[in-house]
Image: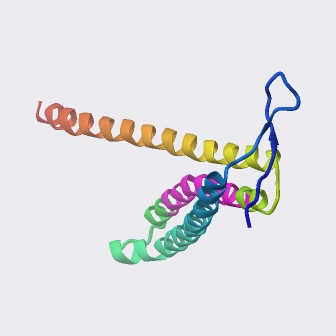
Amino acid sequence: MTQQNEFPTNSSTPQTTFSPTESMLLSLRQTKPWARLLSVLGFISIGFMVIVGMVNIFVFPKVTGGSSFVPGILMVSINILMGLLHFFPSLFLFKFASSISRLLDGGGIKEMEEALLNQKSFWKFVGILILVMFSIAILGIVAAIIIPQIMVK
């Protein structure tokens, strides 16, 4: 049951190998289902966002009493943008879980590198997204303070 994959390292000695410990493989084995679950839930949420956006095209004109589709189209655009923002982290998690599966099925350094690359891409995307969201929130707070003062004058 113990599986030891030997991974050559990039050190100057070609015979040097990196063998993941059983604890490392166990951690990856336990991480894989969670990464897979979150990626699938991400893809499902994208589907819901698109469906809600499409429904809004027809609901907004009836709710607002107007015949314009502009608010509905705006909502679809927002939902599609939100779907795109959810797509890439879901994709990176899915690829991460798939790489772990191949690694645990006897893969080698290629699968380990691929898993780590996809994990890095996931965290980089999420980190940048959070920084952008914080920046937008700060701009919103500043605008909420400044705009009323300008409107009073």
Towards the viewer: 2 or 145: 2
Image point 58% across, 63% down: which residue? 30
- Between 68 and 11, the one lying in front of the other is 11
Against 135, residue 98 (above or below) is below
Q: Where is residue 52 in the image (x, y as percent from the top left)?
A: 49, 72
Q: From what the image shows, is residue 66 above or below residue 147? A: below
Q: Position of residue 39 (x, y in %)?
A: 60, 63
Q: Image quadrant for the C terminus?
A: top left
Please, which residue is most extreme toward the right here?
Answer: 14
Apparent side of residue 138 relative to residue 92 in the rendered image (left or right): left
Left or right position of 153 against 140: left
Q: In this picture, which residue range is highlighted in magenta?
A: 76-98
Q: Which colour scheme is used?
A: rainbow
85, 144: nearer the viewer: 85
In the foreground, 107 or 71: 107
Q: Which secondary structure is most common in the magenta stretch?
A: helix
> Residue lying farthest top?
12
Residue 109, quarter of picture? top right
- Locate residue 26: give its quadrant: bottom right
Q: Which residue is drawn at 47% across and 66% down?
A: 72
The mark total stands at 0
Q: Residue furthest left?
A: 152
Picture quarter with the N terminus: bottom right
Q: Residue at x 54, y 74 (%)?
A: 51
Task: Check the image and report above or below for 60 versus 32.
Answer: below
- Asked if residue 95 is among those painted magenta in the image, a careful observer would answer yes
Which quadrant of the view contains residue 140? Answer: top left
Above/below status of 130 relative to 28: above
Q: Which x, y percent locates residue 102? A: 78, 60
The location of residue 150, given as percent across then percent down, is 18, 31
Outermost residue on the front side: it is 2
- Magenta stretch: includes residue 75: no
